[in-house]
Every structure is written in C-alpha cells, then in structure tokens.
Amino acid sequence: MPIGKLDHFSIRTMDVEASRRFYTEVMGFQAGFRPPFKFPGLWMYNGSQYPETTGVVHIIGIDLNDPQGLKDYLGDRDLDTLSGTGTVDHMAFTATGLTEMQLRLKKHGLAFRERTVPSLNLHQVFFEDPSGVTIELNYPAAEVQQTA
C-alpha cells in the first residue's frame, strides 16, 4: 500500500476572501484551477506547482444560503468548530493500490466514502482516523476502471 506525498490540506471557512488574501499576500500562493464543485472555494498553488498539481491548500467556502453541495461532497461540520485547528478539514495524500486500501479499510471496520473528481483523472477515498481527522487518498481514476 504505497502512500505518496502529502497532496494538500483543506480549510473550511465562512470568509473565503480573507483566506484568499492570507494565502496570496502572506504565503505567496496563487489561486488557480478548481473543478466545478457545488460549493464555493479556491485552490491555492505554490509557485511552480501550477497547473501541475491540485494545489497545496484548498479553501472550502461555506454558503449558509445553499450548504447542500458541501454537505453532499464532504459531509457536514458544526460551525462552532471553525476556529483553531478545527478549521482544518482533511489531509490528503497521493496513493496507488486502490483495491488493497479498500480491503484494508474493510478489514479494520472503517467506513469510507469514494468520489471521482469532475474534470480530473482522480479518484478519492475519504475516511477518519481515531481522532476524527478526515484522511483523503487520491488515486489515478484508472485504478477504479481496473477493479470494475
């Protein structure tokens, strides 16, 4: 079960613009391509990464007037947790060996969710660690076709 490098981290926020300013002005990142998800947000890239990766930070906006797209994709979170480390939504890693990971998660009785990202050749597996931290593993979408 080879797990690769840390891919990105995500932050849920009520103020996408403040996060954009921080990550561009303070960190020196740039906003770039983001698939057409059904919730607001930005993908922030670190210089030469763009457009070769999925970015280093994903800003996940919370639209109180239409929260369903975010709830459907990543699940619901209590708004009271959006401070301190509670703002970190999940950690993501690139990986290979989708079938092996699915079997391992089942063996350990861990519930998991899978998604294929629109516009990208990427299949995602989400699950939680014992502390409730969400882990995302990103596999080439071709691995799904091999298991079908």
Image (tube, grey):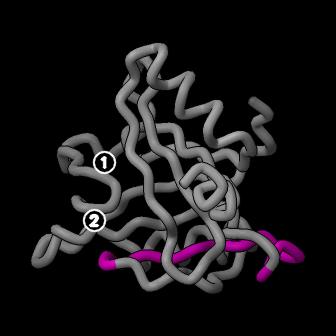
Q: Quadrant of the C terminus?
A: bottom right
Q: Residue at x 43, y 47 (%)?
A: 89
The quadrant holding residue 122 is bottom right
Mark 1 — residue? 82
Q: Identify which residue is drawn at 23% across, 47% down.
A: 77
Q: Dot 2: few (<14), some (14–19), or many (≥20) neighbours within 10 Å? A: some
Residue extending furthest toward the right: 48
Would you place residue 15 above or below residue 132 in this image?
below
Q: Amino acid at mark 1?
A: Leu
Magenta-drawn stretch contains 80: no
Q: Quadrant of residue 106?
A: top left
Q: Quadrant of the N terminus?
A: top right
Where is mark 2, residue-wise?
70
Q: Secondary structure at mark 2?
A: helix
Is residue 97 rendered to the left or right of residue 58?
Answer: right
Amino acid type assigned to the residue bearing label 2 in the image = Leu
Q: Position of residue 108 (x, y in %)?
A: 46, 14
For the magenta stretch, what is the residue range? 38-51
Question: Looking at the image, is mark 2 or mark 1 nearer the viewer?
Answer: 2
Instruction: Indicate whether 9 appears above or below 13.
Output: above
Q: Nearer the viewer, residue 114 or 13?
A: 114
- Where is residue 7 shown, x and y percent of the image? 70, 53
- Within 10 angstroms of label 1, few (less than 14), some, or many (20 or more) residues? some
User: Does residue 65 appear left or right of residue 81 in this picture?
Assistant: left
Residue positioned 38% across, 57% down in the render:
12
As measured in the structure, the alpha-carbon distance from the residue carrying label 2 to the one carrying label 1 is 15 Å
